[in-house]
Amino acid sequence: MNLIIVGAGKVGETLIENFLKESHDITVLDVNAAEVSAIVDRLDVKGVVGSGIERDTLIEAGVESADFFIACTSRDETNILCCVLAKRLGAKRTIARVRDPEYFKEVDGMKEVLGLDFAFNPELNTALEIAQQLKFPSARGVETFVKNRVTMAEYEISEGNPLINKSLREISGEFNNKVLIAVVQRGKECFIPRGDFVIELGDLIHVIAPEAQINTFCKKVKLYKRRAKNVFIVGGGKIAYYLAKELVDAGLSVKIVENDKQRAETLAEDIPKATVILGDGTDNELLDEENLKGSDACVVLTGIDEENVIVSLYAKQRGVNKVITKVDRSSIASMVERLGLDSVVSPKDIIANQIVSFVRAHQAETGNGINTLYKLYDKVEALVFTVRETFSRQSVPLKNLSIKKNVLIGGIVRGNDYIMPNGDSNLLAGDRVIIVTASKQVTDLTQILR
């Protein structure tokens, strides 16, 4: 597939890194010659220097043969105009980054007029992921599928946990659990476990089930913590705006610390149910005065990774039950776990998953394409497919399907009902099916079969 990515910033670079793993032909376009040169040299892609709203520049980039045109500059207006022009010049599908709340609210209604196939908002998606994590305070990470009907949550098995030294088969019998342990990470190894797999101290497990069943399981195995009722947010940018609106609408108490006066006033006006404090979120005396210690959760969202890590460590030290840290730089993210910060979010990685999912879905030839994609440790993926009429193995019991090694059917949603799969389960047209796989570049449901 031929991809053009306009914008050589953090999001654009992350997208390029992800798409290179899938063997696409990529051209990066940006007005900054130094940034284009750095990416071309490091990642060995094609580069064009110029503006994405200039016809000649787009033609030079090969827009007429582009299967996907992705505009992710820092300006919403530029991204939208890029896509309009690219579509007229022959790009098959266009994708725009739209961050402003007012623009994003209207973009769905304008897609057809603009020739826009997909719009993404990294800040909104990050806020929604954080809100999900706050529902599961004991989880390191959370992903939801099929309009929140199914949840996948990650937990660390620590000292004294009753799952230690038990096989999955024993766990199912002893705890009568209705969750599926779909992935286990042990050190640098990642497993899609079978029934005889034994859980060990320090394992990271991913469980799949509806939210209520995960909570029930966690209570049985000493992994449960009560949900946050009051949340302390440090940093008042766009993520904080979207997150605070989501939380206050859900009835939570929210306090935001922001050091820019104009921004603080805007937040106070736009989210009147939240408490907005003008001040430095890295000032420990301010944090203590505003009762950080009494918060159920702290979410640190400043624009500086190092500040986010330091404030998060302080919140941990003050005994806050759930701490979530925004980290953009991969070099820092890789060190964070060693510091004891277990819930880290990265807007660029979240949006990369979403766009890779969109591209993969439109690569499928049979119509059994991807709805959702979620990467685990860069080794395992969880994907959601819709079963189409063209799927030839409908109504066949799973035990009679010849499923490839390192592939697990993690759940089936039929209508509004979740089905925990067993050997007698089957797939029917219209089902949404969750697939966990170590195989790369799965774009179609048929590819899980031998």
Image (spheres, rainbow, N blue to C red):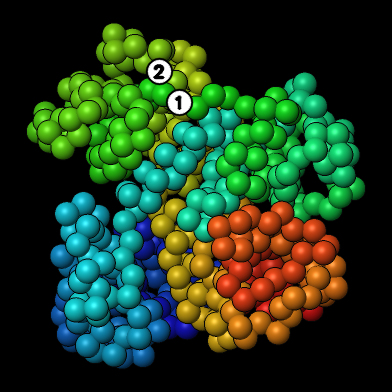
Q: In which quarter of the image is residue 67?
A: bottom left
Q: Is mark 2 on a helix, strand or loop?
A: loop
Which sits in the foreground, 311 or 275?
A: 275
Marks 2 and 1 sit apart, C-alpha to C-alpha, by: 8 Å
Q: Position of residue 310 (x, y in %)?
A: 41, 25
Mark 2 in CB contact with mark 1 (< 8 angstroms): yes
> Disc 2 or 1, which lies upstream in sequence?
1
Q: Say if residue 282 shows up in the picture.
A: yes
Residue at 47 percent of width and 18 percent of height: 320
Above or below, comparing residue 45 to residue 222 in the picture: below
Write down the quadrant of residue 358 in the picture: bottom left
> Which picture quadrant has residue 435?
bottom right
Q: Which quadrant would the C terminus be assigned to in this image?
A: bottom right
Q: Quick one: 79 or 304, which is closer to the camera? A: 79
Q: Name the residue under label 2.
A: 295
Callout 2 amino acid: Ser
- Three-letter code, disc 1: Ala
Left or right, 367 with respect to 66, comes to right
The mark found on residue 228 in the picture is 1
